[in-house]
């Protein structure tokens, strides 16, 4: 009996040893798996960090690119206008109006393609020369991939680049997110549509020089509209009409129409307003929201005018009150103001005259090309003062500030071809990102 018990104790010892070996083996496998999983998590986390950094770079360089585009576009637009004017006014070997529609379209397309090419060249150079590394933290940053950065072997070195695709220029840019041991690259395309042009030939009729009404005459005209005016919203089409508008009145696609309003307040989205030589007489405040494209409009107002996101061409404003613009871009326009002129966020103007009997407040992001600003009060920032931006007294402002209404050109000789009235509507650039 004793011998049997001792034999059982031996079997129990073997069983315990076997279980210990099994436990150690399983623990080793589990530990190894955990270590590998931990390494994989670290690798995935690093990869995610560089991808996130590259995505941050795309968002950052989108804003940088749009700001740079806004700086250069009016310079190239000014050249585009000159080419269109030449097209309409040069009489040899054949006047533009006498060409076939096919030839007219071909000439216009060549001018627009030149505009797109110039924009593409400038933006490509801007991003090619951009060498800053933007830090996310001490171990992570993003940057533009260009010929100055170290590239993987499978990436071409001719980036950034551009090409003209249909009616837009497409700028291709690569952004790299970089950590200590890893990097990720995203490609994005910045699509910039050409401006939509509305070209109105000037009729060869002798017209007297246009002169702005005095402010008392303007107020009299506004406060004494013609009697029994129909409501604009009840008229269709709004061509060659005189009517009374309210805030429900849709002002798009007016054509040579005069509108009388009181405290006008219109617009809730991004809308292009093509007013085609139409005129507003407004009593009180005048507000226009998100006027992405406004063209061929004359506004007389007895109260302050506020516009948001205005991109205006061929416009004339005469205001007894303040003008406030949230993101203002002007071309071929004039302002005659008894009050203050304030632009917020940014201000770009080309071929524009601004006459202000009051203060002028602009932003640091201000670009002026062939633009004159006369003012009687204060200028902010003061460093903008110069030959074309100057303080004058009230008498000089009235006598010398060059006011003109681009929708009423002066014609002395109908035999001489005239520059057309050109209005432009701009669509915002948009991005397509490749992972």
Image (spheres, rainbow, N blue to C red):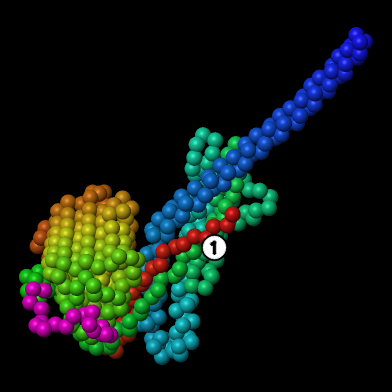
For the point 27% across and 85% down, which residue is it? 236
Type of secondary structure dominating the magenta stretch = loop
Q: Nearer the viewer, residue 41 or 291?
A: 41
In percent of width and height, residue 161 lies at 56, 60
Confirm whether residue 296 shows in the render: no
| Quarter the N terminus occupies | top right
Nearer-the-camera pick, 2 or 381: 2
x and y percentages locating residue 326 in the rendered image: 28, 58
Against 97, residue 275 (above or below) is: above
How many numbered marks does the figure carry? Answer: 1
Q: Horizontal placement of 31 versus 375: left or right?
A: right
Image quadrant containing the C terminus: bottom right
Q: Which residue is mark 1?
A: 162
- Residue sticking out furthest to the front: 1
> 288 or 231, which lies in front?
231
| Residue 335: percent from left, percent from top | 21, 66
| Label 1: which secondary element | strand
Q: Which residues are magenta?
A: 222-239
């Amino acid at each position: 009996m004793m011998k049997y018990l001792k034999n059982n104790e031996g079997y129990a010892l073997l069983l315990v040893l076997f279980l210990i070996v099994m436990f150690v083996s399983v623990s080793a496998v589990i530990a190894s798996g955990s270590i590998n999983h931990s390494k994989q998590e670290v690798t995935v986390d690093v990869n995610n960090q560089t991808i996130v950094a590259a995505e941050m770079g795309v968002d950052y360089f989108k804003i940088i690119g749009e700001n740079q585009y806004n700086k250069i576009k009016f310079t190239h637009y000014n050249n585009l206008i000159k080419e269109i004017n030449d097209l309409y006014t040069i009489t040899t070997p054949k006047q533009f109006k006498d060409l076939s529609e096919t030839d007219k379209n071909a000439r216009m397309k060549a001018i627009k393609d030149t505009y797109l090419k110039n924009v593409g060249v400038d933006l490509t150079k801007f991003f090619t020369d951009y060498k800053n590394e933007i830090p996310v933290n001490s171990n992570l940053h993003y940057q533009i991939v260009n010929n100055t950065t170290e590239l993987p072997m499978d990436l071409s070195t001719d980036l950034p680049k551009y090409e003209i695709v249909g009616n837009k220029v497409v700028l291709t840019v690569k952004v790299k997110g970089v950590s200590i041991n890893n990097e990720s690259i995203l490609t994005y395309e910045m699509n910039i549509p050409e401006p939509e042009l509305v070209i109105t030939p000037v009729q060869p009729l002798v017209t007297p020089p246009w002169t702005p009404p005095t402010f008392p005459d303007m107020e009299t005209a506004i406060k004494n509209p013609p009697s029994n005016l129909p409501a604009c919203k009840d008229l269709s089409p709004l061509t060659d009409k005189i009517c009374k508008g309210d805030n429900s009145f849709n002002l798009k696609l007016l054509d040579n129409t005069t509108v009388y309003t009181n405290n006008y307040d219109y617009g809730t989205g991004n809308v292009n307003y093509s007013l085609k030589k139409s005129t507003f007489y407004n009593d009180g405040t005048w507000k226009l929201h998100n006027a992405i494209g406004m063209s061929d409009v004359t506004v007389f107002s007895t109260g302050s005018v506020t516009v948001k996101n205005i991109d205006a061409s061929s416009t004339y404003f005469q205001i007894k009150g303040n003008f406030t613009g949230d993101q203002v871009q002007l071309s071929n326009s004039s302002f005659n103001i008894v009050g203050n002129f304030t632009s917020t966020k940014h201000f770009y103007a080309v071929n524009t005259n601004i006459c202000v009997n009051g203060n002028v407040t602009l932003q640091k992001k201000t670009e002026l090309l062939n633009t004159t600003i006369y003012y009687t009060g204060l200028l902010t920032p003061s460093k903008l003062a110069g030959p074309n931006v100057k303080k004058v007294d009230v008498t000089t402002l009235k006598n010398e500030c060059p006011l003109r209404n681009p929708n009423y050109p002066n014609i002395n000789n109908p035999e001489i071809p005239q520059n057309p009235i050109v209005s432009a509507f701009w669509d915002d650039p948009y991005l397509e990102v490749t992972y």
